[in-house]
Image: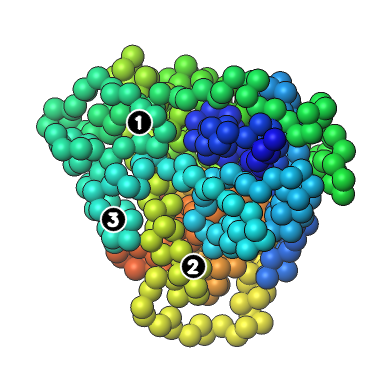
């Protein structure tokens, strides 16, 4: 009887799962869902750990929640430890599978994993499912994306307002009632976007584990063991100063917590204030806090948009709901950039054709500057406060991410790739597409029409922390 593997990657959820639907529709008798921890203790080329304890703890919560749900369907999750290019072909041989289904991720390392699996003889079926918009229905070919975000957004919104066929969402959709804005209101053209009709999973009986007698994620497979991330216990505890109060007393990784958080955010009518508060530096409710779940796929962007549509239908659209769409569309843009440029986004020069001016600082000075920046010891109070928050909690507001990135690149003459690698290590909401896109943007190596962003630190401090509350909040180097 046919057995297929389903490889969970950055899609740790059961709602809005076209890739999993494809596996369930494959005609296989048995399905083995697997997550693969690719070198969880690896270090970067810069010498620090690839994933911090806080980031591992968030992933741990997501995997545990996914396993609980799959176990409830009679098909528990197997979590393997090792390089997927090695682990998955060997696992397929053990269970007699020749096919593997997974989501498509356009970043180079993730593409290399799929290529290696195919080279090992597996038939790998990938499904693109992480964007709001389906690339094949955009107003331009995937390799002809507008050169910067604003014309991209404007073209999408014009298409949504027109009578012509509009960009379609991924996954099955139903037509939404037309609520086109009048010409004298703030643009909310996204409201004409077809609403998502979530496709439920097939009946539990269609998801049979391999082997049939397996009843737990720890079921023995020859040469395999079910593992979860090794996470220090204190990494799961909430830091009282954190804007992302993760842990038993706060937010949790995983789909169950993601949907609960989305529900309470809308129920408390926080979208109404999003535009006004989104540039604040600290607090739980100043931003949506959807990003940690979006990053590992415990929450679908299309599910968010469908819920926001329903919210607008009940309470009316406003600047806050528009800006939530605006930010989700930025997320799409960075993903579509990867479809267009791929590995070019990871070169030192990025997409730039100009040569960078050689730094005046020596190599040793730049190395020392990078270390001081990472540990919040630059002597600049706002930068140091932000970097301490990032170091100790795995979170940082969007405004401060831009400020500290600008400081590293412009004042300390740092390498943008090192900054991106540090964010990858520390952020619980690390997303390969957005992280790369944002660092390229600040560095002037991406699609910013202004050729990079240099934030005036004095101005940023005066505008966003005039009374010094945030700086005092993170004064000193120790966590409470």
Confirm whether residue 384 shows in the render: no
Lower sequence index among marks 2 and 3: 3
Which residue is tagged 2?
A: 343
Q: How many marks?
A: 3
| Front residue (pair 462, 415) | 415
Lower sequence index among marks 1 and 3: 3
Separation of marks 1 and 3 at Cα, in angstroms: 31 Å
Vertical side of 305 occupied by 420: above or below: below
Q: Position of residue 179 (x, y in %)?
A: 21, 22
Lower sequence index among marks 1 and 2: 1
Which quarter of the figure has residue 171? top left
Using a 10 Å C-alpha cutoff, classify the residue at mark 1 as few (fewer than 14 neighbours), some (14 to 19) or many (20 or more).
Answer: some
Q: Is residue 282 left or right of residue 238?
A: left
Vertical side of 102 occupied by 358: above or below: below
Using a 10 Å C-alpha cutoff, classify the residue at mark 3 as few (fewer than 14 neighbours), some (14 to 19) or many (20 or more).
Answer: few
State the mark number for residue 141: 3
| Front residue (pair 266, 151) | 151
Vertical side of 167 occupied by 114: above or below: below
| Front residue (pair 269, 221) | 221
| Between marks 1 and 3 in the image, the one whose residue lies nearer the viewer | 3
Q: Considering the numbered disc 1 on the image, is that residue within a helix, a strand or a loop? A: helix
Confirm whether residue 321 shows in the render: yes
Q: Residue furthest front?
A: 1
Say which residue appears at 75% left-offset and 34% top-offset: 210
Q: Is residue 329 left or right of residue 473?
A: left
Mark 1 and mark 2 residues within 8 Å of each other at the beta carbon: no
Instruction: Report the quarter where the C terminus lies.
Output: top right
Say which residue appears at 35% left-offset and 48% top-offset: 135
| Between marks 1 and 2 in the image, the one whose residue lies nearer the viewer | 2
Which residue is tagged 1?
A: 320
């Amino acid at each position: 009887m046919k057995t297929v593997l389903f490889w969970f990657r950055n899609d740790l959820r059961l709602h809005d799962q076209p890739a999993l639907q494809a596996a369930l529709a494959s005609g296989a008798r048995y399905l083995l869902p697997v997550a693969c921890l690719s070198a969880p203790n690896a270090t970067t080329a810069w010498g620090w750990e690839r994933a911090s304890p806080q980031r591992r703890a968030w992933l741990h919560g997501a995997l545990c929640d996914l396993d609980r749900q799959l176990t409830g369907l009679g098909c528990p999750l197997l979590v393997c430890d090792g390089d997927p290019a090695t682990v998955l072909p060997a696992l397929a041989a053990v269970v007699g599978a020749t096919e593997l289904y997974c989501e498509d991720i356009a970043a180079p390392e993730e593409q290399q994993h799929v290529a290696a699996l195919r080279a090992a003889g597996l038939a790998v079926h990938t499904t693109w499912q992480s964007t709001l918009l389906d690339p094949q229905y955009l107003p331009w070919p995937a390799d002809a994306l507008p050169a910067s975000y604003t014309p991209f957004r404007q073209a999408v919104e014009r298409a949504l307002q027109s009578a012509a066929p509009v960009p379609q969402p991924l996954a099955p959709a139903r037509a939404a009632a037309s609520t086109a804005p009048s010409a004298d209101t703030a643009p909310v053209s996204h409201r004409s976007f077809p609403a998502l009709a979530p496709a439920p999973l097939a009946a539990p009986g269609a998801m049979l584990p391999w082997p049939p007698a397996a009843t737990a994620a720890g079921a023995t497979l020859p040469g395999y063991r079910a593992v979860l991330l090794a996470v220090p216990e204190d990494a799961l505890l909430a830091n009282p100063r954190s804007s992302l109060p993760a842990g038993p007393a706060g937010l949790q990784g995983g789909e169950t917590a993601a949907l609960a958080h989305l529900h309470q955010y809308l129920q408390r009518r926080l979208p109404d204030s999003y535009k006004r508060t989104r540039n604040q530096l600290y607090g739980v409710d100043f931003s949506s806090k959807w990003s940690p779940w979006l990053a590992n796929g415990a929450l679908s962007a299309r599910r968010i948009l469908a819920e926001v549509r329903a919210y607008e239908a009940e309470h009316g659209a406003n600047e806050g709901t528009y800006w939530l769409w605006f930010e989700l569309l930025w997320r799409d843009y960075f993903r579509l950039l990867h479809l267009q440029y791929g590995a070019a986004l990871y070169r030192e020069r990025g997409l730039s054709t100009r040569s960078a001016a050689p730094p005046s600082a020596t190599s040793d000075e730049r190395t020392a500057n990078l270390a001081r920046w990472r540990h919040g010891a630059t002597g600049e109070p706002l930068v140091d406060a932000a970097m301490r928050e990032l170091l100790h909690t795995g979170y940082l507001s969007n405004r401060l991410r831009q400020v500290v990135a600008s400081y590293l690149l412009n004042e300390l003459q740092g390498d943008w790739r090192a900054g991106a690698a540090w964010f990858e290590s520390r952020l619980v909401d690390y997303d390969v597409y957005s992280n790369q896109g944002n660092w390229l943007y600040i560095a002037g190596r991406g699609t910013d029409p202004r050729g990079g962003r240099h934030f005036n630190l004095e101005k940023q401090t005066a505008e966003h922390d005039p009374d010094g509350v945030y700086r005092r909040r993170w004064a000193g180097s120790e966590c409470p």
